[in-house]
Image (cartoon, rainbow, N blue to C red):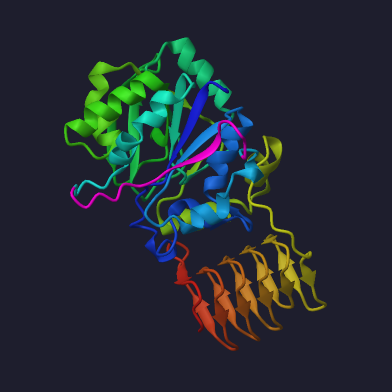
Amino acid sequence: MNYVLGLINLHEDNRLIKEITRKRPIATIPFAGRYRLIDFILSSMVNSGIISVGIMLPDKAASILDHLRSGKDWDLARRHEGLFYLLPSNDDDDIRQSELKTFYQNLNIMRRSPQEYILLSGAHTVFNIDFNNVLRFHQNTNADITMLYYRPGRKLHSPCTVIKTKENGLVSDIANCPAAGEDADVSMGTYLMSRKVFLEIVEHSYERGGSDFLLDGIMRMTAHYNIYGCCYDGYVSCINSLYGYYQTSMDLLNPQIWNELFIDNAPIYTRTKDDVPAQYKSRANVHNSLISNGCTIEGLVENSILFRDVRIEKGVKIKNSIIMQGCQLHKNSCLENVICDKNVTISAEKYLKGAESYPFIVEKNTVI
């Protein structure tokens, strides 16, 4: 896979998850106690042998640069190849500030690349995959473009791209839908193609007024290319809505899903942060939860995820909730179906409850 260039597109629609993306892109949403969403696609690329990865930065890029830095934690801090960044366009004379424009303005980087193929993906999808199998599928079918897709096994209530394929895997139709059924073939937003095809699509689409790679590039040029769908049957979850983030996080409390993502397959890497182990005081009562380093627990935690350095005082009850880094919950407060962003303080005797289908959100640095 050292002849494949990885590209991670961070221009992603956050309209349905804006409560926790006001100051960060979807890619750096905290996840699973110690990870960020971008860790999954980046780790899958590295574990598959890809040694050159480009990050197409969004407008709010500070958290991306802080998390990835030189790429050392993913073994991408290299003298040659390794991690590099594609800067977003800031041309005030052109109102089309888009992913296609960023690609177009960085075409010289792609042209100089020694890699034969380009693997393009977003960062909002959680999975752990070996892309070598996708490359073999691409070569065996003689495809121009290979699209990864999955069958969710449950109804999706957020926007997604659905495809239809023939018996041989050739894609016959692509459509953007507001929701999808459990048996739908849903795109993972990941595409493998030759560098030549990628350059053709970007140049042709942008110079004709396009802005979106999928809509203006692939979907409008299906007649010109052989596009095949490659089905991935492992765990996949797309996080582009608040409910999707909450539901996917709760999935991790299922040991089978946790093992598939983090243990059975190749490791998921993230930025290393050393901390002391979690402390469980004499009154701590913890059931079916993920507890990160640095936490201090004196209350009840059930079916929940606690990130680093969370303090739970006596009498606190937490159920079905996500508590991010640095939060403090004071005596006798109760939270159920709640997401607390970083550095939230819940004072004593407070009761917060959200719905299972729409959790209550406490934004970053809030004091209640």
Please, is residue 315 above or below residue 103 in the view?
A: below
**Front residue (pair 103, 304):** 103
Q: Does the magenta stretch include residue 225?
A: no
* Residue 173 appearing in the image: no
Q: In which quarter of the image is residue 78?
A: top right
Please, is residue 246 above or below residue 166 in the view?
A: below
The residue sitting at 40% across, 51% down in the picture is 240
The magenta span reads: 77-93
x and y, in percent, of residue 14 in the image: 36, 55
Q: Quadrant of residue 211?
A: top left
* Residue 274 appearing in the image: yes
x and y, in percent, of residue 192 in the image: 44, 25
Most extreme residue toward the front is 79
**Front residue (pair 93, 239):** 93
Please, is residue 346 above or below residue 278 in the view?
A: below
**Front residue (pair 182, 150):** 150
In this rendering, the count of numbered labels is 0
The residue sitting at 55% across, 76% down in the picture is 344
The residue sitting at 55% across, 27% down in the picture is 131
x and y, in percent, of residue 229 in the image: 41, 23
x and y, in percent, of residue 36 in the image: 56, 52
**Front residue (pair 201, 159):** 201
